[in-house]
């Protein structure tokens, strides 16, 4: 019997290279207004993380089926950081040297399942790490300053903020996460979502834009 040989998920880049996805880390409640809209105190805790499987990746422009076992699929617009060189106990002052590039992303969430998990004090895995739950635009190399981040549903703005509103900026997140796990090339970090998360219905198209980065678009049927 031949054992299967899984193929790593890949993402396009603006340079024409192919990015091989290793792991996906996601940061919770990294914008104060979003923390408040979810009923939490943004000053009460350090960064915390959850993960998605690498094969949850959806390339921008795709059409995906409405996920099973939910009646409340939500969008969460996020900046995605692509790690180009790994490390452990990375210092915040040098953290950006480990970044290859950035992308727009959408952390799709089965909100009803997340609410059930929270109420039962259980993990969020099935609310966050389901098939087709990580929409990512093409990765662009180079630095990225403070940029506007916007989410639209069929052209209507649902989320609007600036990356500078993050509670924990990218260098702090990289440094903190690298104390918990050794970061590796190919890792992606979803850096949290601003206020305004909400439902995506069947037949709708959701687009996340971040400044001059390529958009992350998905249509749900």
Image (tube, rainbow, N blue to C red):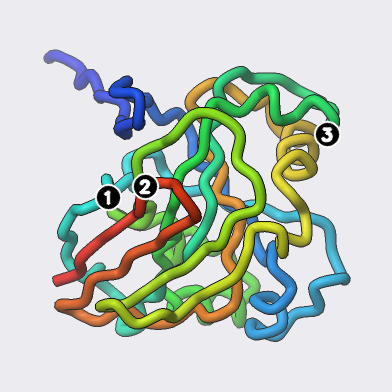
Identify which residue is drawn at 14% across, 14% down: 2
Question: What percent of the width, then of the height, locates residue 4?
Answer: 20, 21
Sequence-wise, which precedes: disc 2 or disc 1? 1
* Quadrant in which the C terminus appears: bottom left
Sequence-wise, which precedes: disc 3 or disc 2? 3
On screen, residue 122 above or below 39: above
Q: Which residue is mark 1?
A: 60
Q: Kindly identify which numbered label has been placed on residue 92.
A: 3
On screen, residue 155 above or below 147: below
Frontmost of labels 3 and 2 is: 2
On screen, residue 28 above or below 99: below
Instruction: Give the spatial CA distance, label 2 vs label 1.
Output: 9 Å
Identify which residue is drawn at 64% across, 58% down: 163
Q: Kindly identify which numbered label has been placed on residue 8.
A: none
Q: Are marks 2 and 1 in contact (CB under 8 Å)?
A: yes
Instruction: Give the spatial CA distance, label 1 vs label 3.
Output: 30 Å
Question: What percent of the width, then of the height, locates residue 125?
Answer: 48, 58
State which quadrant residue 123 falls in: bottom right
Left or right of residue 20, residue 23 in this image: right
Q: Nearer the viewer, residue 64 or 18?
A: 18
Element under disc 3: helix
On screen, residue 55 above or below 155: above
Which residue is outermost to the front? Answer: 212
Sequence-wise, which precedes: disc 1 or disc 3? 1
Q: Which residue is mark 2?
A: 214
Element under disc 1: loop
Left or right of residue 59, residue 162 in this image: right
Identify which residue is drawn at 18% across, 53% down: 62
Instruction: Give the spatial CA distance, label 3 vs label 2.
Output: 27 Å
Question: What percent of the width, then of the height, locates residue 127?
Answer: 44, 66
Q: Few, some or many C-alpha atoms within 10 Å of disc 2 (few <14, some 14-19, many ≥20)?
A: many
């Amino acid at each position: 019997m031949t054992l299967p040989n899984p193929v790593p998920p890949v993402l396009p880049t603006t340079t024409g290279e192919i990015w091989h996805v290793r792991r996906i880390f996601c940061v919770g409640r990294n914008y104060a207004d979003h923390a408040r809209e979810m009923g939490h105190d943004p000053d009460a805790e350090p960064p915390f993380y959850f993960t998605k499987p690498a094969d949850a990746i959806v390339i921008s422009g795709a059409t995906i089926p409405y996920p099973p076992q939910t009646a409340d699929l939500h969008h969460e617009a996020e900046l995605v950081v692509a790690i180009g060189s790994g490390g452990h106990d990375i210092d915040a002052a040098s953290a950006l040297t480990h970044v290859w590039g950035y992308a727009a992303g959408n952390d799709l969430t089965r909100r009803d399942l997340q609410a059930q998990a929270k109420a039962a004090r259980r993990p969020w895995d099935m609310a966050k790490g389901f098939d087709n739950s990580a929409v990512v635009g093409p990765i662009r190399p180079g630095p990225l300053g403070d940029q506007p981040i916007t989410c639209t549903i069929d052209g209507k703005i649902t989320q609007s903020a600036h990356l500078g509103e993050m509670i924990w900026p990218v260098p702090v997140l990289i440094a903190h996460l690298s104390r918990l796990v050794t970061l590796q090339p190919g890792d992606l970090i979803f850096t949290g979502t601003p206020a305004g998360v909400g439902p995506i219905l069947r037949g709708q198209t959701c687009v996340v834009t971040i400044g001059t980065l390529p958009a992350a678009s998905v249509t749900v049927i």
